[in-house]
Image (cartoon, rainbow, N blue to C red):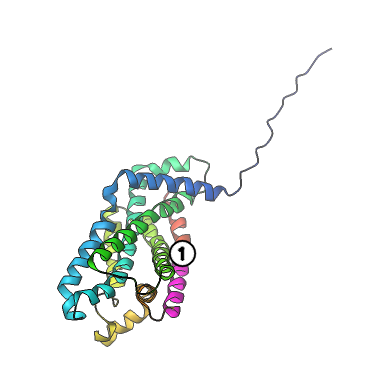
């Protein structure tokens, strides 16, 4: 009588739910730790806005608004938008650097979603926007800036600015996937950001500008966010600017997000 041993196969392991979310959050934690271990990476969202505020307030405040305090009230909400928008540029630069160093080759060997590294990097860089807003408000308060609405409106302004910067950062992610060098990412981002941030009423009222520039200011997405933040912090109309800001945020995510993921898959 021959006894044949039966081969017992291991039971299939059911995939854990929300895999992409968990993987993205894990990689966001990696990005956050990387930033915290190199705090000098936060100089562009801490020291740079302070320099902008000091230069603009004390050079242009008297000429534009008649007093430095009035100009500070007008300028600081706009500088908050500018700083967070510029802060998103680092996301594209860091992703391009990681790809060149081969970090993403290791991610390809892991059983994770292909878009998880991109989502994780963008989520991890949210700390940059929070640091920018907090440091700018602290410095502005020392100089004399005061919120003229209420706490909930101020929080809404901060969240709206962070949401817009997060959405726009997907455009920088796309540039980071397409450019060959980190320096090229930074150069392309600066070329795009200067007309977006300075082609607004950040420094001077739009009424003082020529017609062609006023037309650009009226349709510029960054102008809508600046108007919304000023309305929420200082008072004034907010419904229209807030709705436009949310609209543009959705457009940036829906357009640049899939394009960035597609470019990432083609490159890796």
Which residue corresponds to the image point at 29% horizontal and 78% vertical from the top-left?
Answer: 201
Position in image of residue 211 (x %, y %):
28, 87
Residue at image coords 34%, 64%: 85
- Main SS, magenta region, reads helix
Quadrant in the picture for the N terminus: top right
Q: Residue 209 location in percent, x, y?
A: 25, 84
**Residue 94, position as x, y percentages in the image:** 34, 51
Can you identify the residue that label 1 sits on? 253
Residue 245 included in the magenta stretch of the image: yes
Identify whether 67 is placed above or below 18.
below
Of all residues, the one furthest to the right in this rendering is 1
Viewer-proximal residue, 99 or 222?
222
Whether 186 is drawn above or below 203: the answer is above
Q: Which residues are magenta?
A: 239-254
Which residue is the extreme one toward the top?
Answer: 1
Tell me the residue at 45%/43% (across/down). Answer: 107
The vertical placement of 108 against 230, above or below, is above
Q: Mark 1 falls on what kind of element?
A: helix
Residue situated in front as seen by the camera: 134 or 220: 134
> How many marks can you see?
1
Q: Please determine whether, in this image, residue 4 is positioned above or below residue 161.
A: above
Residues 97 and 148: in front is 148
Q: In which quadrant of the rendered view does residue 212 lie?
A: bottom left
Is residue 100 in view from this perspective?
Answer: no
Name the residue located 34 percent from the left edge and 47 percent from the top edge. Answer: 35
Residue 30: quadrant of the picture: top left
In this rendered view, identify the residue nearer to me: 156 or 250: 156
């Amino acid at each position: 009588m021959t006894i044949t041993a039966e081969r017992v196969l291991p039971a299939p392991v059911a995939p854990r739910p929300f895999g992409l979310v968990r993987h993205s959050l894990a990689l966001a934690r990696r990005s956050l730790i990387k930033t915290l271990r190199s705090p000098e990476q936060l100089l562009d969202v801490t020291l740079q806005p302070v320099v902008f505020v000091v230069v603009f307030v004390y050079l242009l405040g008297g000429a534009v608004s008649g007093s430095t305090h009035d100009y500070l009230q007008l300028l600081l909400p706009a500088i908050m938008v500018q700083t967070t928008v510029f802060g998103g540029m680092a996301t594209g630069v860091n992703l391009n650097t990681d790809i060149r160093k081969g970090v993403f080759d290791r991610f390809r060997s892991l059983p994770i979603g292909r878009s998880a590294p991109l989502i994780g990097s963008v989520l991890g860089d949210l700390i940059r926007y929070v640091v920018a807003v907090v440091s700018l408000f602290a410095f502005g308060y020392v100089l004399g800036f005061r919120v003229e609405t209420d706490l909930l409106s101020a929080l809404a302004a901060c969240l709206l600015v962070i949401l817009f910067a997060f959405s726009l950062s997907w455009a920088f992610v796309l540039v980071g996937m397409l450019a060959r060098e980190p320096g090229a990412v930074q150069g392309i981002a600066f070329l795009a950001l200067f007309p977006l941030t300075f082609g607004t009423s950040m420094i001077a009222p739009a009424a003082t500008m020529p017609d062609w520039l006023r037309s650009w200011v009226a349709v510029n997405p960054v102008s809508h966010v600046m108007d919304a933040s000023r309305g929420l912090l200082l008072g004034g109309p907010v419904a229209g600017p807030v709705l436009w800001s949310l609209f543009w945020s959705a457009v940036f995510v829906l357009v640049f997000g899939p394009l960035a993921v597609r470019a990432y898959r083609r490159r890796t």
